[in-house]
Image (cartoon, rainbow, N blue to C red):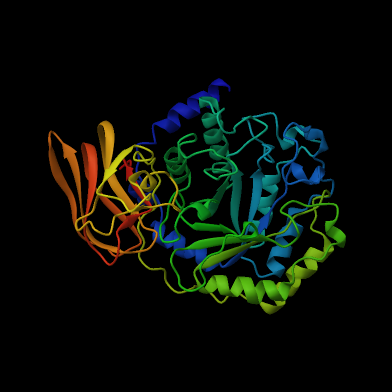
């Protein structure tokens, strides 16, 4: 890491005390950006990186940059193909899990400038899509197996590299409408929001580009009724994740590949792609009806071009589907949770539990398990016990089923319980924000519920404001 980058990190750290509200004032309100995103309706995901030369989605992370050689690379062809399908934007994989950067980065030698191509693909992509009247989004992987940024081996230099790479991407390529991040807090990556601090990255993104929405492709872990660690809910349909098609809950993104895999394979030119008519009628239109933007992946080949069968499918989509304009206005939403959960796996207490549904299950970072109050308890309560006084200004309560309608929150300080909140909230995910307090415990007393009170996850946060 050179001295210039080190100075950059120190400078950026000075900005991290800015809070989400302050960031929003520098650009459009988040609610407006969320509305703009879902109004885009349909875009092109472009998985194009070193894996295409090894016929794998997760290739050898130590493969030589010399194999990356798309001799006919034409990002303008990609953009025109997106236009033919009436798409509104494109999103390119700037760095996937194997760590190869397809832009002129100063953070690592493992990049496109050390390949035979020696051209900045991110620049060519952003220039081509804007020239064709399309919005520009970027994908970036936190998991980086080449640089050994993986579970149980993350260092301060890894965090600095992530910040520096995101800074380059959001500084050198004009307006970026969205940054889609992958490989973070997922069961297959096992890199937590504490290992690479989410709040730091979120605030950095908002400082560099206040109108850029940030998405983490980990929507399946969190309940659809709340925004946790993302401005937009995300669903990877190929992994079985599905947005509810019954009602609109949150602004969302769903992704699916047109071909059989995310990255191009040698079989693709002769292999049928997904049926364009079914994609429109069974996926795109139903998703748009529930405030979900659909991003369809199209994988360019080793020459840097989209295959003919994919081009034909995109043209067919454009013949039968057109963007009808803004969707129904989104309902008012709570700001996303972006801070570390200081209640996670702390000591907890409760009134008598129901059999083995004990208090530990409400702060185990698993939304599929719950603490359940015993049916005989008239006034159930749940409590987090810190090992010392902690500062916090936000409490979230997520339920498996919405049943708690009235409750009060208190914190323990200087030998007494002090009030935080007392009132009604019928939401399945209840977000309580308040002025910062200091306490060694925080307790929820449940005053009314329509059946046995239960909590899937109880979160406590010290948000930067």
Q: Quadrant of the N terminus?
A: top right
Can residue 318 be spotted in the picture? no
Residue 440, image x and y in percent?
Answer: 23, 35
Q: Seen in the image, is 463 located left or right of residue 201?
A: left
Q: Can I make out residue 238 in this image?
A: yes
Instruction: Indicate the position of residue 390 as horizontal and vertical percent values.
Output: 26, 34
- Above or below, 436 against 308 in this view is above
Residue 194 drawn at (x, y percent): 45, 36
Report the front residue among 58 and 305.
58
Quarter in which the C terminus is drawn: top left
24 or 278: nearer the viewer: 278
Q: Determine the residue positioned at 60% across, 49% down.
A: 138
Q: Is residue 190 left or right of residue 433?
A: right
Q: Residue at x 49, y 69 (%)?
A: 291
With respect to residue 188, does 276 lie above or below?
Answer: below
Task: Report the residue at 82% width, 41% height from top.
Answer: 69
Q: Splitting the image into 4 quarters, where does residue 237 fall?
A: bottom right
> Residue 439's quadrant in the figure?
top left
Q: Is residue 463 above or below residue 294?
A: above
Give how far across and how far down residue 292 sits, in percent.
Answer: 53, 66
């Amino acid at each position: 890491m050179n001295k210039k980058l080190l100075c950059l990190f120190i400078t950026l750290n000075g900005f991290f005390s800015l809070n989400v509200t302050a960031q929003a004032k520098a650009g459009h309100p988040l609610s407006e950006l969320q509305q703009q995103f879902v109004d885009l309706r349909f875009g092109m995901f472009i998985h194009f990186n070193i894996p295409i030369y090894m016929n794998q989605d997760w290739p050898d992370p130590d493969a030589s940059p010399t194999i990356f050689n798309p001799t006919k690379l034409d990002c303008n062809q990609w953009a025109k193909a997106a236009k033919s399908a009436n798409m509104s934007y494109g999103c390119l994989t700037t760095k996937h899990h194997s760590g190869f950067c397809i832009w002129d980065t100063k953070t690592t030698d493992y990049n496109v400038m050390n390949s035979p191509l020696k051209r900045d693909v991110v620049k060519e992509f952003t220039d081509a899509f804007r020239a064709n009247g399309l919005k520009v989004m970027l994908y970036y992987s936190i998991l980086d197996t080449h640089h050994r940024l993986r579970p149980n081996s993350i260092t301060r230099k890894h965090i600095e590299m992530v910040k520096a790479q995101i800074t380059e991407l959001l500084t050198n390529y004009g307006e970026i409408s969205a940054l889609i991040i992958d490989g973070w807090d997922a069961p297959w990556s096992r890199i937590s929001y504490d290992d690479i601090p989410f709040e730091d990255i979120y605030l950095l993104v908002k400082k560099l580009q206040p109108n850029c929405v940030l998405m983490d492709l980990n929507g399946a872990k969190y309940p659809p009724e709340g925004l946790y660690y993302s401005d937009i809910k995300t669903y990877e349909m190929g992994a079985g994740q599905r947005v509810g098609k019954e009602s609109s809950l949150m602004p969302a993104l769903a992704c699916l590949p047109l071909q059989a895999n995310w990255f191009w394979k040698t079989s693709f030119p002769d292999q049928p792609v997904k049926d364009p008519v079914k994609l429109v009628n069974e996926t795109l239109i139903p998703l748009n009806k529930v405030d979900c933007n659909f991003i369809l992946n199209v994988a360019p080949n080793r020459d840097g071009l989209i295959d003919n069968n994919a081009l034909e499918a995109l043209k067919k989509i454009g013949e039968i589907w057109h963007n009808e304009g803004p969707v129904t206005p989104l309902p008012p939403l709570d700001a996303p949770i972006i801070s570390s959960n200081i209640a996670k796996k702390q000591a907890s207490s409760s009134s008598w539990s129901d059999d083995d549904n004990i208090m530990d299950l409400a702060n185990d970072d698993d939304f599929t398990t719950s603490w359940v109050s015993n049916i005989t308890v008239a006034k159930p309560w749940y409590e987090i016990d810190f090992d010392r006084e902690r500062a916090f200004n936000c409490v979230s309560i997520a339920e498996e089923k919405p049943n708690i309608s009235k409750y009060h929150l208190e914190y323990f300080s200087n030998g007494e319980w002090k009030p935080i909140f007392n009132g009604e909230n019928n939401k399945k995910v209840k977000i309580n924000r308040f002025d910062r307090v200091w306490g060694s415990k925080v307790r929820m007393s449940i005053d009314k519920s329509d059946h046995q009170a239960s909590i899937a996850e109880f979160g406590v946060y010290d948000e930067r404001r």
